[in-house]
Amino acid sequence: MRSRNYISILCVLGLVCALASQALAVNPAVAPGGSVTFAPTLSQEFSFSWEVLNPAGSVVGSSTTPNSWNVTDVVTGSAPPVISTLTVTCPAGTANGTGYKAFIQGPSRPNGGPFDVQGGTPVVLSSVAVNPNVVLSQASPGPTGTVTLSGPSSGTTTVSLASSLPSIVGVPSSVAVTNGNSSATFSTTIGTVAASQTATITATYSGGQKTATVTVNDELGQVISAIQAQTVQQATEYNVIQAQLVLVAALLLPGVFFGGVWITRKGRA
């Protein structure tokens, strides 16, 4: 009976140790621009094609579309040849993350991970801009917005968007910066205003926010303002011409009547 108890205790201890060892296991780490080597599940190499997944499970590089990633293998044997190690090289701009994985395509899909990327500068939101940022009411198409990251996106980076006046300046709920790119554009829609209105566009990513403004002017108001400005200019030009004529007349004639005052060459009479 005691021997059975001992066996049970040993089995429990063995399970606890295995779980603890698994929990304490640390993924190998690589710095952006560096390389890491694994011993994957041995697999016959029919054809060497690979892909790398980021922690979210999105493919960030592959043998057909590397995006500056690279995976090489060391093959042993010849009948059949098998992959003994994989070396993964990540781009210099790779975002920090836990649980990247590299896979060899094939029936057994040997795993070259997980591995962590550490020591890099996290990609953050640098700016949001809208061009042009002053438009007329109901302008179509609306101005184009651009979000810019501090570095290339690893996988797809989704930036949230919001407008303080959505009925006047409409924006999509988000814009995606695709893998390897550092910026993306989005469209806007412009509504109707009776007077000048300014909307604030807010872009948000990973806790960081950037803003830009778009001013929408009333088209009729713009026309009236232009007419008023032209009228003032014309009136100013008229006054200048009139003053020049009075001066010429005063020099050529004995005197001239201007503004209720008789002006002679000697002065007022």
Image (cartoon, rainbow, N blue to C red):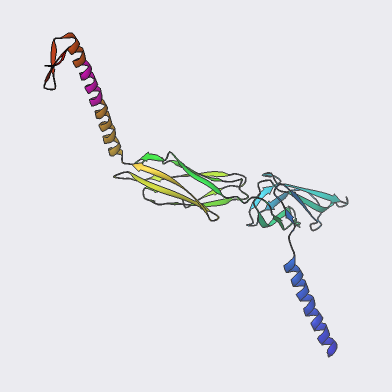
Magenta residues: mostly which secondary structure? Answer: helix
Which image quadrant for residue 27?
A: bottom right
Who's the residue at 75% across and 65% down the image? Answer: 25
User: Would residue 171 be visible to someone looking at this image?
Assistant: no
Q: Position of residue 11 (x, y in %)?
A: 80, 79
- Looking at the picture, does residue 170 appear above or below residue 229? below
User: Would residue 68 be visible to someone looking at this image?
Assistant: yes
| Left/right of residue 234 with respect to residue 14 in the rendered view | left
Q: Which residue is at the front of the view, 267 or 100?
A: 267
Q: Which residue is at the front of the view, 146 or 212?
A: 212
Magenta-colored stretch includes residue 193: no
**Where, quadrant-wise, is the C terminus in this rendering?**
top left
Q: Position of residue 85 (x, y in %)?
A: 81, 53
Who's the residue at 77% across and 75% down the image? Answer: 15
| Left/right of residue 245 with respect to residue 105 in the rendered view | left
Magenta stretch: give its range: 234-245
Q: Which residue is at the front of the view, 127 or 74?
A: 127
Magenta-colored stretch includes residue 241: yes
Query: What is the residue that sits farthest to the front in this orientation?
Result: 266
